[in-house]
Amino acid sequence: MNKTGQIKGKILAPAKMVDYASGAIVSRTLVDRKSGTLTLFAFARGQGLSEHVAPYDAVAQILEGEALITIGGRPLKVGRGGIVIMPANVPHALKAERRFKMLLTMIRGK
């Protein structure tokens, strides 16, 4: 049985399911389907994702720490518990001024 199958039907503590690594971004995919993905990330301080465009809406939920998310040139500081919807085809970037963990939900389709 794969790791995804082992987590189905259970109560999860997502912030505990991915660890920080010095100078790195760590990810763990929980769900990967045609309809979308669910991925955990842990960003070490100073790490980030450069500006890019995705063909689908994506929802970033901050689980721990604080993220700097820039959407269409507009910076947003998002703390623990905050959710940001990054619209499809709009440039966005993420930066860890301090380390943070997030759950990213990518919604594919129309």
Image: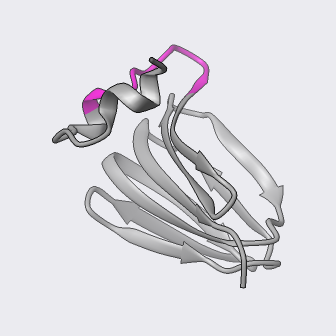
Q: At which x and y percent is residue 62?
A: 37, 55
Q: Nearer the viewer, residue 9 or 37?
A: 9
The verdict on residue 103 being magenta is no
User: Residue 24, located in which quarter of the rendered image?
Assistant: top right
From what the image shows, is residue 71 above or below residue 41?
below
Horizontal side, residue 84 vs residue 66: left or right: right
User: Residue 57, located in which quarter of the rendered image?
Assistant: bottom right
Q: How many marks?
A: 0
Q: How is the image coloured?
A: one colour
Residue drawn at (59%, 34%) of the image: 46
Residue drawn at (33%, 67%) of the image: 82
Examine the residues drawn in magenta and state their main secondary structure: loop
Q: Which of 21 and 3 is in front in this view?
A: 3
Q: Which of 105 and 49 is in front in this view?
A: 105
Q: At which x and y percent is residue 22?
A: 52, 14
User: Residue 6, located in which quarter of the rendered image?
Assistant: top left
From what the image shows, is residue 9 above or below residue 33?
above
Give the residues in magenta: 16-26
Q: At which x and y percent is residue 15?
A: 29, 37
Horizontal side, residue 26 vs residue 11: left or right: right
Q: Looking at the figure, which quarter contains the C terminus? A: bottom right
Residue drawn at (31%, 39%) of the image: 8
